[in-house]
Image: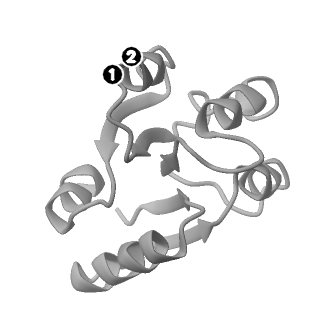
Amino acid sequence: MEKTLLFVEDDEATSYIYQYVLRKIEFKGDYKIINNGEDAISALLNSEFAPDIIFLDINMPRINGFEFLDALKEKYPLKEKNSLVFMLTNSLNPDDEKRAMEYPEVKGFLSKPLTKETLLEIIN
């Protein structure tokens, strides 16, 4: 089964790496990279995109990854949509991981950028 992926990532260089890795693994599914949480929320609420897996940057301008999850709780419950969330960060703060894992939708806490091996493991 082909997966549908959403990357919520504000850093252009990191977004480029994700596109490169997807090409390297010959990813056949659909994916979007949205560069801020507000636009990602809008895309989900307007049914523009129904991802199986969301790779969510924690530290973004305007709204961060935690605010993104909180904003969707009522209007687009990720758990009911069977969307799995993997939080991504460059942070070394152990409190970020603890907080991320308090969300039932969050299935993992990963360091950026994603490697080819990690992405394949998650998709499969």
Check residue 76 in the rendering and tell me which mark sits there, or answer none.
none
Q: How many marks?
A: 2
What amino acid is labelled 1 in the image? Pro
Q: Residue furthest left?
A: 117
Where residue 28 appears, as percent x and y from the top left, is: 36, 79
Of the 4 image quadrants, the one containing the C terminus is bottom left
For label 2, the residue is 98
Q: Amino acid at mark 2?
A: Lys
Q: Secondary structure at mark 1?
A: helix
Q: Which mark is residue 94?
A: 1
Residue under the point 21% across and 63% down: 115
Residue drawn 56% across the image and 44% down it: 59
Whether residue 27 appears in this view of the structure is no
Residue 18, percent from left and from top: 38, 72
> Counting other residues with Cα less than 10 Å from the Cα at mark 1, is it few (<14), some (14-19), or many (20 or more)?
few
User: Pointers 2 and 1 in contact (CB under 8 A)?
Assistant: yes
Q: Select label 2 or label 1 by which is in front.
A: 1
